[in-house]
Amino acid sequence: MQWLGKPFAGFLLLENRVVASAGLAHWPAAQRGEIYQLRVDRFDGREVETASDLADHVARLPIGTPIRYVMQDGPREHVVEIATRRFGWLDLGLLFGAYLFCGLGIGGLALSIRYLRGGDATANGTFIPLWIVGMYSLTAMDLYGPYHFFRLHALCESFLFAAMIHLAMAFPEPFDWLVKNPRRIRAL
């Protein structure tokens, strides 16, 4: 919400200064797609130390101000000029709305299952993976700033595969092998 109505660079920058491979079709920087996965080293002749440096600079400029970027792709240097643009309701809804909707919906579903079914094996086998996916979606909204939940997002991402295997083995009924060999599962 803090971006709403304010100028932004016209592309999304990750905390490590790499241009995210995400954007909306009506953003000029996204239409070309050539800047994705490049690292921003300088803007308007200034060295970039953190992604917040660029966000602070852009926030002080009028909308439509062109900024000259020097970006790195390994040994190659790219110079591009991209004008600032206003971050509007459409941008907010399309970019972060899906993350918020999915995160709250899946996280809420996980809590509902846990509350309604209690602690049986099916409820646990369903709650845990859905909760991880919900948290993954909610923390994804912070990937592009202010970068408070990146580590939690990465942790959730690392558990996604195991969570889906867990879900497949426990839903809609626990896998026969799990029911017949509970001691082996506890040992794992």
Image (spheres, rainbow, N blue to C red):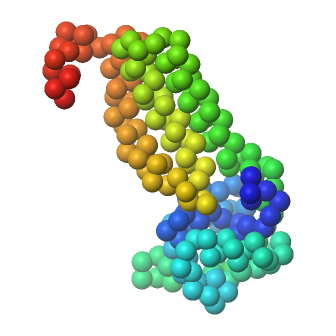
Q: Is residue 100 left or right of residue 60?
A: left
Q: Is residue 114 left or right of residue 45?
A: left
x, y (%) of residue 77? Answer: 51, 83
Location of residue 150 with respect to 49 vertically, above or below: above
x, y (%) of residue 100? Answer: 65, 40
Q: Quadrant of residue 81?
A: bottom right
Q: Residue at x 34, y 26 (%)?
A: 166
Instruction: Compare residues 44 and 114 and report the one nearer the observer.
Output: 114
How many numbered circles are shown?
0
Q: Is residue 28 left or right of residue 70?
A: right
* Position of the C terminus by quadrant: top left
Q: Residue at x 64, y 75 (%)?
A: 54
x, y (%) of residue 131? Answer: 49, 31
Q: Quadrant of residue 177?
A: top left
Q: Residue at x 63, y 90 (%)?
A: 45
- Residue farthest to the bottom? 45
x, y (%) of residue 162? Answer: 34, 34
Q: Is residue 79 visible?
A: no
Instruction: Compare residues 25 and 6 and report the one nearer the observer.
Output: 6
Q: Quadrant of residue 82?
A: bottom right
Q: Residue at x 76, y 79 (%)?
A: 66
Location of residue 94 with respect to 82 vertically, above or below: above
Q: Is residue 115 visible?
A: yes
